[in-house]
Amino acid sequence: MRMSKLFSQTLREAPADAEIPSHRLLVRAGYIRQLAAGIFTAMPLAHRSLTKIEDIMREEIDAIGGQEMSMPVIHPAEIWKRTGRWSKVGAEMGRFKDRNGRDMALAMTHEEAVVDIVKDEIQSYRQLPILIYHIQTKWRDDPRPRAGLIRVREFTMKDSYSLDRDWEGLDRQYRAHYQAYFKIFQRCALPVIAVESDVGMMGGNMAHEFMYLTPVGEDTLLLCEACGYKANRQIAEFQKEKPPQEEEKPLEKVETPDAKTIKDLTELLDIPDRKTSKVVFMMATLLREGEEIEQLVFAIVRGDMELNETKLANAIQAKALRPAEEEEIQAVGAVPGYASPIGLDRVLVVVDDLIPESPNMVAGANEEEYHYLNVNYGRDYEADVVADIAAAGDEDPCPQCGAPLHEVRGIEVGNIFKLGTWYSEAVGATYQDKDSQEKPIVMGSYGIGSGRLLASIVEEYHDEYGLMLPISVAPYEVHLVSLGGFTEEDEVQAVAESVYERLKAGGVEVLFDDRDESPGVKFNDADLIGVPIRLTVGARSLEEGGVEMKLRDEQERTLISEGDVVERVQETIDRLHQEIMDNVKPQTLEE
RNA sequence: CGGGGUGUAGCGCAGAGGGCAGCGCGCCGCGUUUGGGACGCGGAGGUCGACGGUUCAAGUCCGUCCACCCCGACCA
């Protein structure tokens, strides 16, 4: 490709609203342009990189038996109503009516489309297992797109769906994906870890997220270096130290002026914060007899801990959770700052499982300026649900080995889910087994977003001058810079043209800077675009005997005689590919 | 949805006591220059986010709305 014809320009300055490196550099280098919040155009450079990423995904999913297909991106509402997700999913789903007034949806994921086709195509156990996948556009109307390609609304995703007779089969396909995903990310040279994750609204009973660790990530993870425990904070567990047992003392009401926070209270009463319990007020959307209701929830954790909203939502099967408004809290007779479940009804009380083990706690008296001492769970109040709802944090003891956990941030670049039979049962996607019984198909789903993956790779591989893409995902293998091109009969330009033609003939992907620009402009653009191998043809290099080669991530320059260019470049390309493949190591899911 | 911020040329920004809409980069033409974002001369490019109001006169003052960014809520 000649840069004089390339449909994109580099920018000397990044748009003011781009903050993280991958966003700034991808825009500056001319890979992407923004159309609206969370909606981007992939210019030719990004398109080439994305295609390479997608081809890697194709190869690895094909290798575990995947069959690529394409599915509709516009769905009739019916298939979403059949699984109940038409109403279960909120504004995140794009909806519209067709000309006849029928409800339609923009696909945010394809479980519905899969089970709809599967229920008709699969009849017999002889047809299973199956692995299908597609690489297509999905739309999720995220309330807050941000950070360039990291979090967008319209995106391309590789989604696989596994279909099995039983859970053993699902387990095999899940493990196969676990390994294939590591291989995909390793081939993209992106370091990732797999963490256990929440199964969310997709249902199912096991899920892993593949995380690229970076401070710009939005997910918080807890890792144990001692035993290897890794989990998303949303589900991370930790060992809770039980307090020493004590005699239950009688309930006592004390005056606590201006003690609205745990900190005020512990200072006033001179007690540690783990002797207090704190109430977090949430409004939960619950399904009761098919009706959606909003219910005030008192979520109670020990004063030294934080509430984990995901755990709470799972504990009470809430469809949605939001912080309660002051009026909603007062409506049930509670007093914010001095609240407790003692003597209240009309609230759903959920206590962390450590609370029943904690005697003689301090809690609010539901009266301005008063708290109770020696509150004992069971004697003074009871909960509707007792569950682990406390958030694990930095330095908390690992649930497996007790060593301190470490909190890090990550970007979720892929995920794998054991869906089970939830979708197949909802639509009657069954097969007839050997024993003539109709059984629901057991499903899994497995996704990787290609744009987010590209952005993560850029986060990992860049410097102050631009991208430094691994050769497996770079838009071109070689960036050929001609420092000639100013006169008709220019030897430098003639050599560069010849090198360009010969490299192309040799199957090398070349971006040829044939523009009439100054050397500084060309070198800076080459650094910005970040192609791994740079070749320079200039009067100086010709004088010294040939063409200069430099790798984007190294300072060293080597001179190649003009006749050897194709061979030497191909060797280098092979070497760079090989270096990436040398780091591809099988990763097996351990129980 | 709550809090904060920003909308002026392709990009980065100035202009704010109301009175001809500017600068740098980029772009076009001519010439010089050529190993790390060159220089000279000449040029093109704007419904100043939108609508409404005040005024002789609005980029500037007032109101409403919209878009985008950041924090939070949210995130299969």
Image (spheres, rainbow, N blue to C red):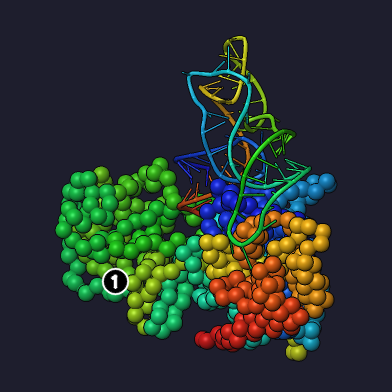
Residue at numbered disc 1: A357
* Vertical position of residue A158 compared to residue B53: above or below: below
Residue A508 % position (x, y)? 76, 75
The residue depicted at 69 percent of the width and 67 percent of the height is A539
On-image quarter of the N terminus of chain A: bottom right
Disc 1 is placed on an element classified as helix
> Is residue A371 shown to the viewer in this render?
no
* Vertical position of residue A20 compared to residue A583: above or below: above
Q: Nearer the viewer, residue A11 or A378?
A: A11
Residue A267 % position (x, y)? 18, 55
Relative to A13, A100 lies left or right: right
The residue depicted at 55 percent of the width and 48 percent of the height is A17
Relative to A423, A305 lies left or right: left
The crowd level at tag 1 (other Cα within 10 Å; few <14, some 14-19, many 20+) is some
> Is residue A19 shown to the viewer in this render?
yes
Residue A274 % position (x, y)? 25, 65
Count of labels in the image: 1
Q: Which of A18 and A274 is in front in this view?
A: A18
Q: Nearer the viewer, residue A340 or A548?
A: A548
Disc 1 residue type? Glu
The residue depicted at 39 percent of the width and 44 percent of the height is A326
* Vertical position of residue A114 compared to residue A16: above or below: below
Relative to A355, A374 lies left or right: left
Q: Which of A479 and A59 is in front in this view?
A: A479
Residue A21 % position (x, y)? 54, 59
Chain under disc 1: A
The residue depicted at 49 percent of the width and 67 percent of the height is A214
Which image quarter: residue A563? bottom right
